[in-house]
Image (tube, helix red, strand yellow):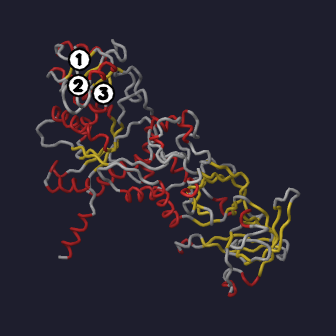
Amino acid sequence: MAEQTNAEEAKKSLNFIEQIVENDLAEGKNGGRIQTRFPPEPNGYLHIGHAKAICLDFGIAKRYNGICNLRFDDTNPVKEDVEYVDSIKEDIQWLGFQWKDIYYASDYFQQLFDFAIRLIKQGHAYVDEQSSEVIAQQKGTPTQPGVESPYRNRPAEESLDLFLRMNQGEFEEGSMTLRAKIDMASSNMHFRDPIIYRIIKHPHHRTGTTWKVYPMYDFAHGQSDYFEGVTHSLCTLEFEVHRPLYDYFIDLLMTDDGYRPRQTEFNRLNLTYTMMSKRKLLQLVKERLVAGWDDPRMPTLCGYRRRGFTPQSIRNFIDRIGYTKYDGIIDVALLEHSVREDLNETAKRVSAVLNPVKLLITNYPEGKTEQLEAVNNPERPEDGVHEITFSRELYIEQEDFMEDAPKKYYRLTPGQEVRLKSAYIIKCTGCKKAADGTIEEVYAEYLPETKSGLPDSSRKVKSTIHWVSVAHSLPAEIRLYDRLFLAENPAEEKDKELKDLLNPDSLKVLANCRVEAELAEAKPYDHFQFQRIGYFNLDPDSKDGRLIFNRTVSLKDTWNKIKDKV
């Protein structure tokens, strides 16, 4: 009875796609095979929305002992490049997935071309000599039938001759297309004689100048699934209206072997304060509004990687939001929560002072130093400790001292005690100011018996602050990243220029920071918690001893308070 209950509970937790897969397996469809594919077009870098599809495509295959292939939808040579192919491979593997095989739509160009010829011969396709603009006008509206092309009933032999000559390069781009001959009065606009081939004379990144005609997505996608043996073709919701056409072409193509791919749609990922349009992201790069595809403010996977997000945090985020049949918008704070949660468990704790002011411990012996122990991660005792050097001259944050402090200010102010993290309690005795009133130096005395770990170290004070030794710390540049867009849903701000939607404070560079000497050994992409400040990672720009750290996220989300003032 208990086993039956557990099985029922497990079934209840399935998302609707997993339920479809289980039903197909129970019915013995496709010989019990499960095969998925991730089919990106190599015309840009993958973004966080693609991560949702990657987790689903590869996750379904893994859960049901199937396979998932990577297939590049390279049917438009004008926009595609090997650079994007390589970046896509890298991003998938970084997320923690591995494809079974790699395919390209271009692998099937000959088969697709042969299928198109078959459609022409069977009266299912014809060559149209009208412009794409005229064809669009003739499509009609959802409530008004379309107008048939004057070329719709031309003899199959004539269409075949023209199509072959189109591929030989005899005609200019835009002068002719091959259209499927279906139904100009269909209630589904996609059935109104869709274009299935167009002339493109731009060299292809794999096939060079072999082809002068290229298939449209709706013609190539389903057939490629069929050629590969895909059982479950998982797409985002915008392709739901394309599914009848997907099935129509497969019906014409398939043999009687009992196998056919099935397309299922799920909701795409939309995040607040985030732009997901590849076209808009490319615009940001081309207009140099960001530093490149991997700018840590970009929603690209390489951007998140450079900013310090972990693969686990992104996978956890995708698991949390799940898959449904309804589009919505997810608060980006949930993604930020996911990376905080992961880094809290894994990131090493270190000290960094972003806006330093010197603290002089006046009763600490000159020239003396001590090696103190700092816990690497309180969440993981097994990670142990590392040594930090304590000395007479330290750096603390400017905001941790106030000469004339309000009543509830518990950090350093004359006459008040605080604990220095992993060290001693100190009592502030005063400060030195420059002619303009800025604080040049803070003075304090330490209480030797309050060293962390000693019996009197349990003495209570209301605040603990972090620090680094002046002589035993390293200079560093700190890049404070925040959300790139001010608008909650930038995609809806169609009446504004892209540059006018950007958050002017999305990047602040602090050049005179100090970090503890432990970070001299850090490697690019290593993660750290800068105590009391946030999570950071070492940027790959760091070289020749010049340390550069990117803020991944703050310790707490302060965005909601800030944006209310914008």
Q: For the N terminus, which image quadrant?
A: bottom left
In-image side of 216 versus 229 (left or right): right
Q: Position of residue 363 (x, y in %)?
A: 84, 77
Residue occupying image coordinates x 26% and y 25%: 140
Query: Measured from the top left, where is residue 480 in percent x and y?
Result: 62, 53
Q: Which is more foreground, mark 3 or mark 2?
A: 2
Q: Residues within 10 Å of mark 3 (few under 14, many from 20)?
A: many
Amino acid under disc 1: Ser
The tally of labels here is: 3
Residue 47, quarter of the rendered image = top left
Alpha-carbon distance for marks 3 and 1?
20 Å
Q: Residue furthest left?
A: 256
The residue carrying mark 1 is 149
Q: Viewed as shown, does residue 531 lie left or right of 109?
A: right
Q: Amino acid at mark 3?
A: Pro
**Percent x, y for residue 527?**
56, 59
For the question of whether residue 315 can be seen, the reply is: yes
Query: Disc 3 to disc 2, how far (Cα)?
Result: 14 Å
What residue sits right under mark 2 in the picture? 193
Identify the residue position indicated by label 3 in the image.
215
Counting from the top left corner in percent of width and height, residue 485 is at 53, 45
Name which residue type carries label 2: Asp
Q: What is the crowding at mark 1: few (fewer than 14 residues within 10 Å), some, or many (at least 20)?
A: some
150 lies above or below 322:
above
